[in-house]
Amino acid sequence: MTSQAGWPAAPIDQAAVARSLRPFGASVMLPPAAYLDPAVFAWEHRHFFGAGWTCVGFGSELAQPGDQRAEPTGAGSVLLTRDDDGGLHAFANTCRHRGHELLECGTTARRNSVICPYHSWTYALSGELSHASGLTRREGFNASAWGLVELPAAEWHGLIFVDGSRGQAGSLSGALAALDEVVAPYEPERLVIAGRHTYDTAANWKILSENYHECYHCPVIHPELCRVSPPKSAENYPPQPAWLGGWMKLRDGMDTMSLDGTSLGVPLRGLDGSALRAVSYLNIFPNVLLSLHPDYVMTHRLTPLAADRTIIECTWAFPPEALARPGFDPGYAVEFWDITNRQDWGACESVQRGLASPHAGPGPLSPEEDAVHEFVSMVARGYQGQPVWTPHEALQPPA
């Protein structure tokens, strides 16, 4: 999430950005440069992904003291550790000696200290320098001045977020207070990941998020989805400063999102009434897409690598009592969404290619794309140098 102080405007045509901020019905999409220009991508990497709260993984991936994991974030990467008291820490993944990565991105370790693989500088799990060969006992060397650079970290319903602004982004729990009311009954922190796919897509991260926020395309490319959920049943949550999203109903006789609408799991214990007949689709800006089902939670975590390339980690988590059932197979959910995901990624990659045409330009939005307008408005405000999470009612749309 953004620094509340704002930041420099993005290197993009600001008049075109202003047209994206017009009221819904009069606005257009972002200009093609937002999806194609390496300079815009570099700006996003620094400001959207490196200067505020972003999701870097799951608490369950650092379950035990000594667990360590490195993940990309912004222009660099972050080292996550779980200390002996169970505390979570996040550090810039760079040794204070010569800058070597402490752990290669995407890898894990379990040991009682952090050891740089270059010259063996050694740090406590809480970041203090404990040993530097030839220097630790040297007169005048102050080890306390050379601990790891710590970044604010927080766990929110099983997800780990890190603030690359080093404390300027405000409280994560405060920013997501309204969303907490939506997510808490699903208890995602209690669920167990039983399925995981990683997709390497040739599309800009924003195209993927925009696609997630509308079912205008569903009758055309998602026959499986339309069989279990009416594509015109979508409703949105009121605009919020840190997230956006909505929900869609299940058809009568359907229990969940699967190829035949049948659930092979169990309903989540915190749900009743309408929550058992709908699926919520939520976007925590900039990189989490959280899909809440009556019997499982699906999470997409986006890691942009270039203007035209994004890695998507997709996980499916179920209640422990479902996994305890003899012969339980998460495939009923995983197969359905793998089919749907691949349909979406193919469409998004085609959008990416189409926007590269010299004749491409920002198009208007249909009445069914109001959530896309909300997302585009978040991005456009950021491009103008405004905090992304300013409440809508506090903003004056451009004339």
Image (cartoon, helix red, strand yellow):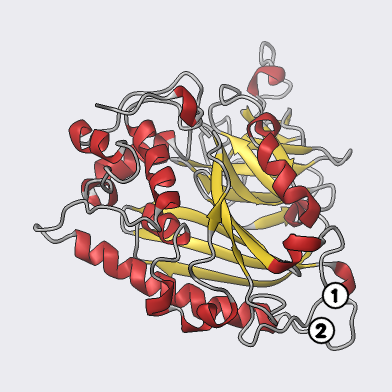
Q: Give the side of residue 68 with respect to residue 228, left or right.
A: right
Q: Position of residue 40 (x, y in %)?
A: 28, 41
Q: Residue at x 67, y 37 (%)?
A: 178
Which amino acid, mark 1?
Answer: Ala
Disc nearer the start of the sequence (1/2): 1
Q: Give the side of residue 350 with respect to residue 195, left or right.
A: left
SS category of the residue bearing label 1: helix
The picture quadrant where one finds residue 298 is bottom right
Q: 176 and 68: which one is in front?
A: 176
Q: Position of residue 219 (x, y in %)?
A: 41, 77
Tag of residue 328: 2
Residue 198 visible? The answer is: yes
Tag of residue 322: 1
Q: 267 and 356: which one is in front?
A: 267
Give above or below for 382 relative to 253: above
**Neighbour class for label 1 at 10 Å: few (<14), some, many (≥20)?**
many
Q: Distance between the Cα atoms at labels 1 and 2? A: 7 Å
SS category of the residue bearing label 2: loop
Residue extending farthest to the top is 140
| Screen quadrant of the C terminus | top left
Q: Residue at x 67, y 78 (%)?
A: 252
Look at the numbered discs 1 and 2 and tell me whether their residues touch, using CB distance below 8 Å.
Answer: yes
Q: Position of residue 57 (x, y in %)?
A: 64, 52
Tag of residue 187: none
Give above or below for 38 relative to 222: above
Give above or below for 88 relative to 358: above
Q: Give the side of residue 35 with respect to residue 120, left or right.
A: left
The picture quadrant where one finds residue 243 is top right
